[in-house]
Image (cartoon, helix red, strand yellow):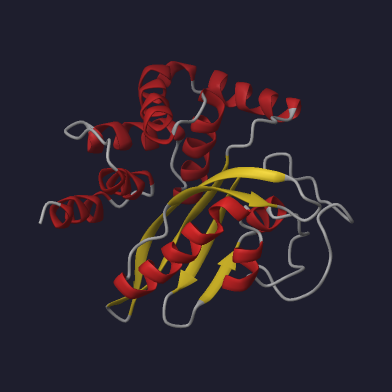
Amino acid sequence: MANSGSGHADDAAPDRAEARVGRFRYWFDADRWEWSDEVAVMHGYSPGDITPTTELMMSHKHPADRESFAQLVQRMRLTKAPFSSRHRIVAVGGRVRSVIVIGRTFAEAGSVVGTDGFYLDVDDVVDESVRGRVADHVQHFRENGAIIEQAKGMLMIVYGLDAERAFDVLRWVSQTRNVPVHEVSRSMVDAAADGAWVSENERRSFDLVVLGSTDDAAASGNAAGH
């Protein structure tokens, strides 16, 4: 996670062609953020060059999305809700990126204290080298193609992604949980088989499924029905 410092990603950019998915963590009461190197790069910083704060995060929101982000932070601090959103960020240098943020709550000492999850860059510009690597992964798991395609299709429908971005999510979850992509896909499809998400509240349930917390997803769905 990032430390204090100064600098921009353009000054000494690492090889981050695949930095389209990155992790974040936020503590409600402490109003404290952490982000991975990938999320720092999305915002235009070099890894480790700056510590994220709510004020910094706010400053990078697109002006049209800033008020809704402020309301989201206030609501999740009051209700201990996960941070899930689709909005635009303005990186250092002025580049506008569209991102999807998928989060779940986490506990410390038995109490919910924050939310963590991942940022997904859904900007339209796709580096050709990334296209090649994604194609390699798809080819590698071709024997499990049917279940992977089902999971990709679910992600594409729920989050409005294209096929490559959907596979990015599956690959990121695979790496985070240290399980093969086809197993991630199968567990996701099996967990979602009885549900269809259309509303914002129902989509939050799917956020939890993506992150591997199917029990929490079921609890969230029950709470939403009250």
Res. 53 in view? no
| Residue appearing at x 29%, y 31% in the figure | 189
**Rendering coords of residue 129 (x, y %):** 75, 28
Q: Nearer the viewer, residue 98 or 207?
A: 98
Instruction: List x then y, in percent, for residue 155.
Output: 40, 32
Left or right side of 165 for 56: right
Relative to 105, is 213 above or below? above
Q: Describe residue 30's horizontal placement relative to residue 157 as left or right.
A: right
Q: Is residue 48 left or right of residue 150?
A: right
From this viewpoint, which residue is outermost toward the right?
11
At horizontal 73% and vertical 76% (from top left) the residue drawn is 4
Which residue: 24% across, 51% down? 217
In the rendered image, which quarter contains the C terminus? bottom left
User: What count of labels does the image hold?
Assistant: 0
Toward which corner of the image does residue 7 lie, by quadrant? Answer: bottom right
In the depicted structure, whether residue 216 falls above or below residue 16:
below
Q: Quadrant of residue 149?
A: top left
**How far across and down, in percent of the image, does residue 162 sit?**
52, 25
**Where does the image place residue 134, in percent across and percent down from the top left?**
61, 27
- Residue 29 can be seen, yes or no: yes
